Amino acid sequence: MIILAATPIGNLGDASARLVDALGSAEVVAAEDTRTTIKLLKGLGIAHKPKLISLHEHNEREKSAELVESARNSDLLVLSDAGMPTVSDPGYHLVVAAVDAGVPVTVIPGPSAVITALAVSGLPTDRFSFEGFLPRKQGDRLTTLRSLEHERRTMVFFESPNRLASSLADVASVLGKDRRTVVCRELTKMFEEVKRGTAAELAEWASDGVRGEICIVIAGAEEREFSLHDGVSEVLERVATGERLKDAAGSVSEATGLSKRELYQAALAVKK
């Protein structure tokens, strides 16, 4: 059996009793970083020393088949450095391989930076999407944000502190400078900070430099009625930034419910 176990995202006091029991008895542990796991064992006062196998983004695909076969005969405990394995962390390909091979997978639930940030944000929690990390390159980041421009669910992102200011500036540019945004920093740790404001306000705040583990929570778009004129204007704005007309019409159609064919033809007529 494969056991996915959530580890603390900062505060060791959040380690569950089940996690402690599992670490105290596991024969084999697949860990994102074995050094982090050794520190976790020491921090939790666990003297037991399981066999540690490194499982990270660079070797997961090649190791998954072997680990799945070994899990047929003895349990394999899987850990990421913090939070739940598979959620922007190694483990997904291992789980897919296990499911395909008919090997049972279970979970020891626990801390999650995504859910923690969402809960503390003060933004709607009834419907949300987790978008992982925004792309490193600005062009790719802008494309991703444009695809989310009409997303009505609350959105949760991870972000590097080094890119936070530029990413928030792009959020303000694409989603609107007044879009409600929350930056959650160092959740559950000594210097935990939750900063709320508009995208523009937080971009300015972050420009002085921010440290630590970062989650960004962004309010979903407000519901609005789109006319064909509105849709064509948006298509043309996208084309002006380098997007193909056909692709822009498709994206706007999907976001607004307007006809892709009508958007394309109307935008083409304007361009002529």
Image (spheres, rainbow, N blue to C red):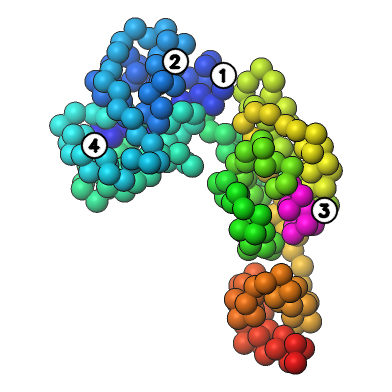
Q: Quadrant for residue 34, please give it.
A: top left
Judging by the rendered image, the residue that carries numbered circle 1 is 11
Tell me if 203 is positioned left or right of 3 in this view.
Answer: right
* Marked residue nearer the N-terminal end (2 or 4): 2
* SS state under label 2: helix
* Marked residue nearer the N-terminal end (3 or 4): 4
- In this rendering, which labeled residue sits more in front, label 1 or label 4? 4
- In this rendering, which labeled residue sits more in front, label 1 or label 3? 3
In three-dimensional space, the C-alpha distance between marks 3 and 4, rounded to whole angstroms, equals 48 Å
In three-dimensional space, the C-alpha distance between marks 1 and 3, rounded to whole angstroms, equals 34 Å
Judging by the rendered image, the residue that carries numbered circle 2 is 39
Tell me if 265 is positioned left or right of 111 in this view.
Answer: right
The range drawn in magenta is 168-176
From the viewer's side, name the closer residue of 77 and 31. 31
* Marked residue nearer the N-terminal end (1 or 4): 1
Verify CB contact (< 8 Å) between mark 2 and mark 4: no
* Marked residue nearer the N-terminal end (1 or 2): 1
In three-dimensional space, the C-alpha distance between marks 1 and 2, rounded to whole angstroms, equals 13 Å
- In this rendering, which labeled residue sits more in front, label 1 or label 2? 2
Verify CB contact (< 8 Å) between mark 1 and mark 3: no
